[in-house]
Image (cartoon, rainbow, N blue to C red):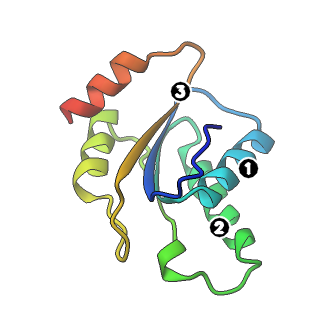
Amino acid sequence: MPDAADGAPWRVVVIAEMGVDPRWQAQVSTWMVRSGCLYMMAWGEDCSSWDDMVDWALIEEFHFEDIPEERFVMTTWHEGCALAEVFHFCKHSAFHHRIEIVRTVLLHIAQHPAEQVTVQAYLQA
């Protein structure tokens, strides 16, 4: 996963066009929690599992204790929605209740990359 060491708060849209190994999914979820992700939206195949996995990564990060409000990661899954709707939600509704989120990451999980098409769809939402 990319280095997100600057710690700036960010949100992510997981665009799952294919299933993944649960161990990799757990690693990615832990990376999200540890690197400053404060809002995760999942869309596509097994999107509810992304919601659960990030929730578990957050709970484990704080050793099953109270989670500080400024580190709480909001998670949503968008089964049955059009991707454009998720992008619109991300841009207009996905805000942390305490911290201003300054970046958005689009995590596209697919057999073939489609960076330009994905970014263009996000910009048009």
**Residue at screen point 72% across, 69% down:** 61
| Mark 3 and mark 2: Cα distance apart in space | 24 Å
Mark 2 neighbour class, 10 Å CA radius: few under 14, some 14 to 19, many 20 or more: many
How many residues crowd mark 3 within 10 Å: few (<14), some (14–19), many (20+)?
A: some
| Front residue of 68 and 118 | 68
Q: Secondary structure at mark 3?
A: loop
Check disc 3 and report the residue beneath it: 17
| Viewer can see residue 76 | no
Disc 1 and disc 3 in contact, CB within 8 angstroms: no
Which residue has dot 1 on it?
26
Say which mark, if any, is on residue 88.
none
The residue labelled by disc 2 is 58
Q: Which label sits in the foreground, 1 or 3?
A: 1
Check disc 1 and give the amino acid type: Ala
- Amino acid type, residue under disc 2 in the picture: Leu
Q: Are marks 1 and 2 in contact (CB under 8 Å)?
A: no
Residue positioned 34% across, 75% down in the render: 97
The answer to which image quadrant residue 57 occupies is bottom right
> In the image as oriented, which residue stretches furthest toward the bottom?
66
Q: Secondary structure at mark 2?
A: helix
Quadrant for the N terminus in the image: top right
Q: Position of residue 24 (x, y in %)?
A: 75, 40
**3D distance between C-alphas at marks 1 and 2:** 11 Å
Instruction: Look at 56% across and 55% down and name the residue there.
Output: 51
Mark nearest the camera among 3 and 2 is: 2
Instruction: Tell me if I can see residue 73 in this picture.
Output: yes
- Identify the amino acid type marked 3: Glu
Q: Position of residue 111 (x, y in %)?
A: 60, 16
As helix, strand or loop, the secondary structure at mark 1 comes to helix
In primary-sequence order, the first of circles 1 and 2 is 1
